[in-house]
Image (cartoon, rainbow, N blue to C red):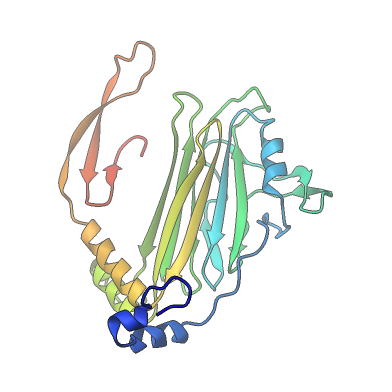
Amino acid sequence: VSPYDGKPTIKQKSGNTDWSQMLRMRSQPSRAPMAQFPIDAQRTPLLLAALRKKLGDFALTTMLRVKNMSDEPLRLKSGVQLKDGRYIKSLNASDPHNDVLCYHLYPGPEIPPRSEVVIVARSGGGKWVRTSGIEGQLAYTNKDETWIFKISFCNSFAGHVRKCRTEATHMAKSGEDDDDDDDLEGEDAKAGDGYWKISKDEIDHKANNEYVISIDALRGNDATIAAFHHRRSQATIKAGYLHKNRAFGLGLQWHQRWIVLTPAELFLLSGYW
């Protein structure tokens, strides 16, 4: 009996110990802690509270906090140019030691392992007289370029359309067939090469919106399970046209959009996603 609560311990309940689970836990190497502070494109530590205060001076901004949870660097593949708006190349703000520094908030060439990089885009024009919205896409790859991670974001000039979508795609290696990508994901996961995932959290949905994007590599049984669930989620439950109201003027403008419903997500394949 446990001396703390008088209840039988897990070992006493089961009568034996799951040694295989313990061995799996011990075989997994301990990971380094995440960096204490986020960084900019020049790897300068920054203070989020001070940065948010400065961004409040702009009419329209989108902050992307991209977290590399893995143990290898992520390299920028594309996204230096925006379709609408522009990245903030320099902004003075207080650092974690209350010193004022100039931060560079455009996409850097690499995200170091176990770190978080902050990227900020703003609307065109002056601080309060905006001439455009914000729209762009970032793409990163892992070290051996077998996975690509896409981050699409939109903060529109009109209509209050504020979206962010993430996608992780397995890329076929040299000599492999792209058509068998789902099978390759499962085989790589079983072989110990890992299965990568990307997720997002919306922190602020206002004009100065903010998203946290996390990218990580799963190993062992977690990778196999994730690959299996992803393969199932690719099945199409239903597809068809949806009439969408653009909400301009009297709200009488309706447009057809092709949608695809899967067990995991509803895709809007034309117009705004």
Who is closer to the viewer here, 224 or 14? 14
Q: Quadrant of the N terminus?
A: bottom left
* Count of numbered labels shown in the rendering: 0
Asked if 247 appears above or below 106 in the picture, the reply is above
Q: Residue at x 71, y 49 (%)?
A: 47
* Residue 178 in view (yes/no): no
Q: Residue at x 59, y 31 (%)?
A: 60
Q: Is residue 93 left or right of residue 263?
A: right
Q: Quadrant of residue 168?
A: bottom left
Who is closer to the viewer here, 182 or 225? 225
Q: Residue at x 18, y 56 (%)?
A: 235
* Residue 62 horizontal/vertical position (percent): 56, 39
Q: Is residue 197 left or right of residue 237?
A: right
Q: Quadrant of the C terminus?
A: top left
* Residue 210 in view (yes/no): yes
Asked if 195 appears above or below 250 in the picture, the reply is below
Asked if 160 appears above or below 79 in the picture, the reply is above
* Residue 128 horizontal/vertical position (percent): 66, 24
Q: Is residue 55 left or right of residue 135?
A: right
Asked if 61 appears above or below 250 in the picture, the reply is below
Q: Is residue 55 left or right of residue 222?
A: right
Who is closer to the viewer here, 218 or 139? 218
* Residue 85 horizontal/vertical position (percent): 57, 36
Q: Which residue sits furthest top?
A: 250
* Residue 89 horizontal/vertical position (percent): 69, 45
Q: Which residue sits furthest right?
A: 99
